[in-house]
Image (cartoon, helix red, strand yellow):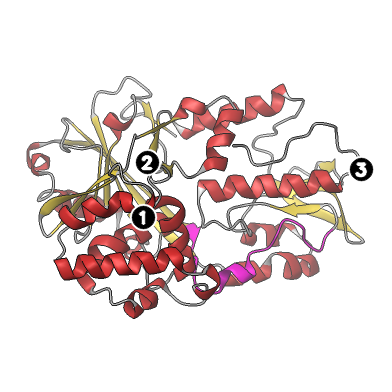
Amino acid sequence: YWDPVVAEYVDYGVHVVMRCCEAFRGFLKRIGESDAVSFAPSLSIPLWCGGRRHLLRSSPLPGPLHLLPSLLHDLPLTWSQRLSAMRAGAALWSASPGTLADVTFDVWLSHHRQDAQTRAVLWHPVVIATLNAPASRVSAAAAQKVFLDGVLQRRGAGLGFFQRPLSRISASAVSYIEAHGGTASLRSAVHKIVVQQGQVRGLRLTTGEFLEADTIISAVPPKDLASLLPRTAAMEVALPAQQALKGSPIVNVHLWLDRPVLDEVLWIAADAPIQTAFDVTRLRPPSGTARYHHLAISQSAASEWLKSSDAQIVDRCLHALAPLAPRVASAHLVHARVIRHPQATFIPAPGVDRHRPRPVCGIRGLYLAGDWTATGWPSTLEGAVRSGILAAGRATASSSEMADGVDVTPML
């Protein structure tokens, strides 16, 4: 959105992409936005714990060993805790995902003798940042996905940051559609998906206009999908997922100060009231004639924060920043925005994958997409793109009018 007070475009939150998100990177390449995300050459995350700064960083060692020097020398753990963490990491690496699907990650960590300090320093910050829920609520399988595909892969663990507002990237996607013969109808709200005799017939817009179509890909959340479908179809297609997938909130706090206050573009706090801080001004070039320094706080699994007023949240952030970024005390707060996402992502709880539907549902011509569908990934940009690829693949394969050369393989 455009913020007139500071005269710049602001994303609702700071999105971070890991290099392992290959489908999303392929999507950016396809729409001409390959340079929209800038990746760090290797993983390097400052971690505040016990009032001291530590560093979780990659080394030249291959595979899961790339974090070994950091584990042994940089993190505030005893030698016993480090050895225990290495054993747990090896067990997570070799475990079959099927054995992890019905147990929480916290229970799994207990079985592998990870004490409170090791969890707080090593396991919990990664889980909350990537899955938007504490280890006590996510399945061990979901946590394994994050660590095996991302954190424990030397190349896959690299973090990428957007270099321009997401609205510009969305505009490029629209341009791509139009350049390939499609039409993007923005601000055209759908009232109902019209279904007759088990086959989709089109869309009824809120304006009353009817758009005829025998193939529809829906990328809306299950609650919205249920409201668009006839009651019987909604109970079969959308309600099971709606009931099983519980949402988790994220609160983003944007602060504009009259001077820089962070020494790094990003850090994570393991034991502070705030979780993650970003120096947005240093992460990407300002989108307008920026006069102030933009700092963003991202709070995952933020149910308690939803109960507070904007002023209380801003005050909480400034007080929490003081011991971690002392220059905050002398900085002047020019402007602040609090953005709440009550249902930002779904919680990948034990057993929840059984309720995530595949693209083909019980209605002919209707295909399901969205990060809540069965993608094999948690609720992420990567999962969203993969869902679209899967749905498009099934839709084109089922269409008698499929054009030659349509490419619906993963966009890598």
Describe the element under mark 1 as helix, strand or loop. helix
State the CA–CA distance, disc 2 to disc 3. 42 Å
Residue ID for mark 1: 129
Query: Mark 1 belongs to which amino acid?
Result: Ala
On the image, the x and y values in percent for residue 242 come to: 61, 67
Q: Are marks 1 and 2 in contact (CB under 8 Å)?
A: no
Q: How many marks?
A: 3
Query: Mark 2 belongs to which amino acid?
Result: Leu
Query: Mark 3 belongs to which amino acid?
Result: Ser
Name the foreground residue: 271 vs 343: 271
On the image, the x and y values in percent for residue 396 come to: 81, 43
Q: Nearer the viewer, mark 2 or mark 3?
A: 2
Q: Are marks 1 and 3 in contact (CB under 8 Å)?
A: no
Q: Earlier in the sequence, mark 2 or mark 3?
A: 2
User: Image quarter for residue 304?
Assistant: bottom left
Q: Residue at x 38, y 24 (%)?
A: 287
Which contiguous range is marked in magenta?
A: 344-363
User: Image quarter for residue 227?
Assistant: bottom right
Residue ID for mark 2: 159
Asked whether 188 falls inside the magenta stretch, the response is no
Answer with left or right where residue 369 lies relative to residue 288. Answer: right
Q: Residue at x 68, y 63 (%)?
A: 357
Residue ID for mark 3: 400
